[in-house]
């Protein structure tokens, strides 16, 4: 279900794409500049967002980095809910995890942003496991996006476009470096997400990633602040939350699909991790 320019509630649950009549954007995409596909970039742009600018993507097939250049807007994260994104802060969002952002009424919000669509079988450029907010200097990324746009709209020299493209991607990679999940972990969680009904254990997870159980525990605590099995439970609940919002499946059908023996054990785990019972969450 997609809503255009409708109000967003405290917990975003309706797919929303609204630029707003007063928003100015300058962007280019891989259809205009095919070389962007070499870095799996689909769009790069600048937005001066005004009234009604709001986006909610429930299970996006793209990942994105968005940085406030001037002013402030609001972004949504699981741990903090809606929060202000001031100048010099980035909102980094992975694919397949809900994210949302919006302008604040009567305030302009200038952002620079890049969206990626990576092949499913490789470690994604943005490999964080949940949307995050972090400090980031917007100046170099903003300059690279403007340079790419200006070259496309003036001379469109393929060699210069390729240089701007690579410079843009390098700046994004540098900003993401401290948040990048190790390849081994990414491959483990990708396999888990494809097989949530499997009876996972620390040993089977470690075997999947070709690491020792103890090293897996170290990696998980370092990058997720959780044990391996607690993180598996988190992935299961993320998928369950999506099913609760987007389907009419009964709890008895959802439970075995994500590795629980029955609806009761699933409901208890869901409330412990998500803070609401499945039915409370579905009715929000």
Image (spheres, helix red, strand yellow):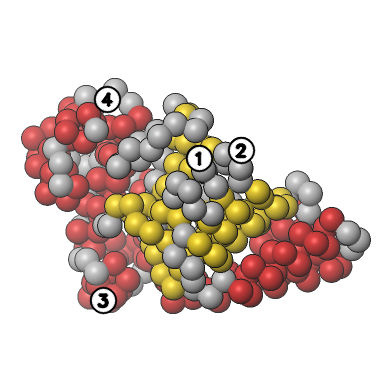
Calculate the distance from the C-alpha at mark 2 to the C-alpha at mark 3.
49 Å
Calculate the distance from the C-alpha at mark 2 to the C-alpha at mark 4.
38 Å
Calculate the distance from the C-alpha at mark 4 to the C-alpha at mark 3.
37 Å
* Residue at numbered disc 4: 249
Question: What kind of element bears circle 2?
Answer: loop
Question: What kind of element bears circle 4?
Answer: loop
Q: Tell me if label 3 and label 1 are in contact, CB under 8 Å.
A: no
N-terminal-most mark, 3 or 1: 1
- Disc assigned to residue 52: 1
Assign the N terminus to one quadrant of the image.
top left
* Residue at numbered disc 3: 218
Disc 4 packing (10 Å; few <14; some 14–19; many ≥20):
few
* Residue at numbered disc 2: 21
Q: Residue at x 61, y 74 (%)?
A: 139
Assign the C terminus to one quadrant of the image.
top left
Question: What kind of element bears circle 3?
Answer: helix
Calculate the distance from the C-alpha at mark 1 to the C-alpha at mark 2.
8 Å
Would you say residue 204 is visible in this rendering? Answer: no
Closer-to-camera residue (127/102):
102
Disc 1 packing (10 Å; few <14; some 14–19; many ≥20):
many
N-terminal-most mark, 4 or 3: 3
């Amino acid at each position: 279900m997609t809503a255009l320019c409708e109000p967003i509630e405290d917990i975003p649950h309706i797919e929303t794409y609204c630029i707003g009549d007063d928003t100015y954007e300058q962007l280019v995409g891989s259809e205009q500049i095919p070389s962007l596909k070499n870095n799996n970039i689909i769009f790069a742009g600048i937005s001066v967002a005004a009234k009604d600018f709001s986006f909610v993507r429930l299970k996006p097939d793209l990942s994105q980095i968005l940085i406030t250049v001037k002013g402030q807007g609001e972004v949504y994260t699981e741990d903090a809910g809606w929060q202000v994104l001031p100048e010099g802060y980035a909102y980094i969002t992975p694919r397949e995890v809900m994210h949302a952002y919006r302008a604040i009424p009567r305030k302009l919000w200038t952002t620079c942003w890049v969206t990626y669509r990576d092949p499913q079988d490789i470690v994604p450029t943005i490999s964080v496991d949940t949307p995050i907010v972090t400090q980031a200097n917007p100046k170099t990324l903003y300059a690279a996006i403007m340079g790419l746009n200006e070259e496309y709209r003036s001379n469109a020299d393929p060699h210069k476009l390729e240089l701007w493209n690579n410079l843009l991607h390098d700046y994004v990679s540098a900003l993401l470096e401290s948040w990048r999940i190790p390849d081994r972990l990414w491959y483990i969680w990708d396999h888990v997400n494809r097989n949530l009904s499997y009876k996972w254990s620390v040993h089977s997870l470690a075997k999947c990633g070709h690491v020792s159980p103890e090293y897996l525990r170290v990696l998980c605590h370092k990058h997720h602040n959780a044990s391996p099995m607690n993180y598996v439970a988190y992935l299961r609940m993320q998928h369950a939350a999506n099913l609760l919002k987007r389907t009419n499946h009964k709890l008895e059908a959802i439970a075995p699909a994500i590795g629980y023996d029955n609806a009761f054990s699933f409901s208890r785990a869901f409330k412990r991790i998500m803070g609401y019972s499945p039915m409370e969450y579905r009715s929000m």
